Image (tube, rainbow, N blue to C red):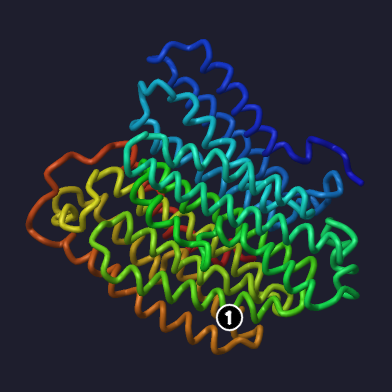
């Protein structure tokens, strides 16, 4: 067993930054708490550098419970990069707030939990990571202490607590019939266990990760939190925890190979993408529209998870799609923060009033559809290939139909951008910079996919 803490350098960078930020916030005056944000950003950048170094090393297992492999590398880089963008987005909104330092620290602690979700190769570590990713996010959702934020935080917490209990019940059942919690032990133990008990344990276990992913049936919190929470927090909770959740689901499936997994996840994927797209059709609030869009995207992301162990395309499809989704979703939310309007009519004439920002929004929204040469296009091509190669052609057909259907509600947002009316207010510079950067990354990942996938 490898017990070298240096192999967890990215996670330690985030943890140290969070602790230093919390301690510094105790002594800094209110006007000086922005320095905590700098400390947190420095920790995230250091974590990204450490992740890049770790990606060049051979795969290994740390402390017999944490696996460092390509899934871990992508999870780390996507989570750390996305969290850094969220810290920048949040800085302008919480500047001078009495709890500014706590806001940054909560974001980092939740991001650490999201990373551990993707790294964990043991059910007990998975539960601890779930709690670490969830509890700070509950506080962030209600950070504004207004009516909408309080309602969002309450719904978020209650659903997370309920599904977390179901997850714990699943872990207990799988431990009992599988005679262990480590994934290699479970793979051997579940092969001889009663099929009914294994099925019940797997279904209960799925409750937690599916909640974090915003997938059916744990999706009800997503639109309320996206609308009621502060915009930067909405961008965070619809992006970063999903990365860890999908990585955790894929690792569990690939390393334990439970019976019936592909069929179960295929049904959940089809239901999730269909519900998300249908519910988005009538939305006039852009944050709720993006919320249902993220639910639909979760359905697409579940396709390669369902194909884990059935095709070699499953892993690259999931990892590339996750990275593409993170960039695209953050870019879209960054535009919302920059404009400062939640109604579709508020974006009329954005391409005339702020061409670069409007173009960034067009790139992100068309990216969600899967239009070339965006990054999501490559992710969807790999996703379709994984479904077909894994023997689930019907799931690929459902995904194709939902992709075409999603064009309608994205166009409802894109069309007003070309009108003559101009956006009245000046866009926020930091948010606009994040939006443009995300759009550029989306195009770069799409155009450079050949290099990235080799």
Provide residue 274's location: percent of width, then percent of height. 43, 76
Whether residue 403 is visible, yes or no, is yes
Q: Residues within 10 Å of mark 1 (few under 14, many from 20)?
A: some
Provide residue 246's location: percent of width, then percent of height. 61, 61
Identify the residue shown where x is 64% and y is 45%. 131
Identify the residue shown where x is 63% and y is 37%. 47
Q: Quadrant of the C terminus?
A: bottom right
Q: Is residue 172 above or below residue 79?
A: below
94 displayed left or right of 326: left
User: Is residue 40 or residue 409 the one in the foreground?
Assistant: 409
Q: Is residue 432 above or below residue 31?
A: below
User: Is residue 156 or residue 323 the one in the foreground?
Assistant: 156
Identify the residue shown where x is 57% and y is 45%. 134
- Extreme residue in the left direction: 420
User: Is residue 209 or residue 166 the one in the foreground?
Assistant: 166
Q: Quadrant of residue 377?
A: bottom left
Residue position for label 1: 385
414 displayed left or right of 271: left
Q: Quadrant of residue 184?
A: bottom right
Callout 1: helix, strand or loop? helix
Whether residue 372 is visible, yes or no, is no
1 displayed left or right of 27: right
Number of numbered callouts drawn: 1
Q: Is residue 395 above or below residue 378?
A: below
Provide residue 446's location: percent of width, then percent of height. 47, 64
User: Is residue 163 or residue 315 the one in the foreground?
Assistant: 163
Provide residue 369's location: percent of width, then percent of height. 38, 71
């Amino acid at each position: 067993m490898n017990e070298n803490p240096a192999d967890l350098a990215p996670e330690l960078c985030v943890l140290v930054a969070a602790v230093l930020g919390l301690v510094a916030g105790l002594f800094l005056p209110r006007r000086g708490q922005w320095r905590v944000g700098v400390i947190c950003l420095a920790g995230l950048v250091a974590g990204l550098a450490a992740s890049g170094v770790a990606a060049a090393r051979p795969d290994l297992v740390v402390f017999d419970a944490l696996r460092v492999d390509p899934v871990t590398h992508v999870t780390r880089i996507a989570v750390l990069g996305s969290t850094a963008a969220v810290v920048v987005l949040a800085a302008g909104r919480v500047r001078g707030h009495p709890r500014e330092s706590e806001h940054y620290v909560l974001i980092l602690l939740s991001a650490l939990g999201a990373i551990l979700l993707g790294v964990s190769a043991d059910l007990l570590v998975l539960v601890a990571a779930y709690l670490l990713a969830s509890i700070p996010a509950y506080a962030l959702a209600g950070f504004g202490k207004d009516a909408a934020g309080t309602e969002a935080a309450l719904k978020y917490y209650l659903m997370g607590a309920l599904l977390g209990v179901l997850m714990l019940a699943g872990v207990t059942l799988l431990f009992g019939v599988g005679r262990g919690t480590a994934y290699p032990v479970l793979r051997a133990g579940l092969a001889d266990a009663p099929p009914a008990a294994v099925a019940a344990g797997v279904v209960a276990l799925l409750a937690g990760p599916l909640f974090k992913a915003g997938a059916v049936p744990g999706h009800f919190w997503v639109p309320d939190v996206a609308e009621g929470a502060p915009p930067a927090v909405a961008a965070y909770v619809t992006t970063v925890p999903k990365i860890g959740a999908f990585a955790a689901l894929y690792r569990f499936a690939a390393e334990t190979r439970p019976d019936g997994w592909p069929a179960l996840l295929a049904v959940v994927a089809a239901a999730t993408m269909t519900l998300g797209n249908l519910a988005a059709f009538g939305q006039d609030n852009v944050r709720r529209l993006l919320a249902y869009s993220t639910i639909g995207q979760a359905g697409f992301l579940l396709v390669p998870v369902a194909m884990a162990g059935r095709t070699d395309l499953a892993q690259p499809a999931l990892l590339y799609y996750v990275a593409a989704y993170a960039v695209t979703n953050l870019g879209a939310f960054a535009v919302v923060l920059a404009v400062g309007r939640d109604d579709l009519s508020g974006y009329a004439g954005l391409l005339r009033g702020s061409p670069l920002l409007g173009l960034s929004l067009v790139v992100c929204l068309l990216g969600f559809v899967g239009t070339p040469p965006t990054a999501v296009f490559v992710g969807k091509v790999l996703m379709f290939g994984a479904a077909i190669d894994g023997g689930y052609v019907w799931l690929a057909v459902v995904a194709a139909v939902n992709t075409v259907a999603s064009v309608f509600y994205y166009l409802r947002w894109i069309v007003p951008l070309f009108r003559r009316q101009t956006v009245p207010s000046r866009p926020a510079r930091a948010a606009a910079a994040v939006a443009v950067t995300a759009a550029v990354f989306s195009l770069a990942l799409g155009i450079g996919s050949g290099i990235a996938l080799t």
